[in-house]
Image (spheres, rainbow, N blue to C red):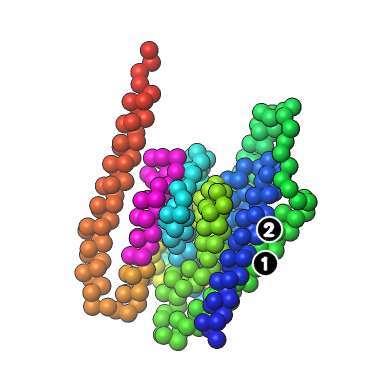
Amino acid sequence: MNLLLLAVGLVLLTAGAEALVRGASGIAARLGIPPLIVGLTVVAFGTSAPELAVSVAAAWSDQADIALGNVVGSNIFNVLFILGLSALIAPLAISSQLIRVDVPLMIGASILVLLFALDGTIGRVDGAILFTGLLLYTGYQIRQGQREQRAAAEATSGEEQDTPPGRWWQDPLLVVGGLVVLVLGSRLLVQSAVAIAQGLGVSELVIGLTIVAAGTSLPEVATSVVASLRGQRDIAVGNVIGSNVFNLLGVLGLASLVSPSGIAVAAQALQFDLPVMIAVALACLPIFVTGREIARWEGALFFLYYLAYTTYVVMAAMHHAALGLYGTAMLWFVLPLTAVTLMVLFARHHFMARRNNGPPA
């Protein structure tokens, strides 16, 4: 029965993602709103609804490990797995706004969460600060969208605007219907996956970091992959970055506010998983800065790192004998090699940019 529910959940997620991307793209076209802004707000917040529901419910039930593990695991999953998989399908366009505003904000919010967690608990005051940050971020995105809409209207004044086919009410209906189907599908999938994992005796933190995080992030997977296939690459990237910001500021903020005693932070999460989340966020910066798109090989690198991270978490949960050797190989060989590669790419990009600009004539 759990396997059947898992399959039904996947089907619902795919159908909901198709409706959400189609509706969001239609709204952007009708209102003249840049697709990136739609991806960072409507689509990102909508596809993060499962994370919000799961983490708030877990925090209310005093299941702190699932509440925190869901957010941390989802953010790692979003960048490494979703961006990696989407870039493998088609190179993803990178907007200058992502480089200047949204990625630095994601990095800053990740570091802020770690600082709040150093005392072992993310309390209600911490949650209020995080949620206030979400309100400010949303207000900025709305103003940014209005500014770009006015600029586009002035640039195309006097020109005939192309109107998308269909009636105006169909696009909002697709967005709402897609979100409902996404939430329902993710709920079926998470419940069945958690039941299977609990039957195998896996801890709540590991369930939150892997099964629940991947399950609640499947709306983002389906949405970004479908957006990539449909050529809506701004929505594919904006969905991931916006979802991560929403997870940190909105989901974790609200979960901390409703939790009776705050969200307790396990030692494993503080020593390993939160630093990994920050490292993953930092890895976006040089890749995003060095080009106008995420290339397929960079997507493959992200995807392989998610497999490596998941392998480590599972091996740690099983107390596998090879865990020490695996961790040593990752720490002293794979991670430094990747860091050197990214630094070389960043330095090469900076050098080429300076050479192309050249001294003034």
Three-letter amino acid code of the residue under disc 2:
Val
Please, is residue 346 above or below residue 67 in the view?
Answer: above
The residue that mark 1 highlights is 180
Which SS class for mark 2? helix
| Disc 1 residue crowd, few under 14, some 14–19, many 20+, Cα 10 Å | some
At 51% from the left edge and 50% from the top edge, which residue is drawn? 237
Principal SS element in the magenta part?
A: helix
Q: Secondary structure at mark 1?
A: helix
Query: Measuring 46% from the left and 73% from the top, which residue is drawn there?
Result: 211
Q: Is residue 148 magenta?
A: no
Dot 2 corresponds to which residue?
175
Extreme top residue here?
A: 361
The magenta-colored residue range is 280-308
Residue 307 is a magenta residue:
yes
Query: In the image, residue 247 lies at what x, y percent?
Result: 53, 60
Between 89 and 338, which is closer to the camera in this rendering? Answer: 89
Q: Position of residue 249 (x, y in %)?
A: 55, 57
Q: CA distance from mark 2 to mark 1?
A: 9 Å
In screen coordinates, is 26 left or right of 188?
A: right
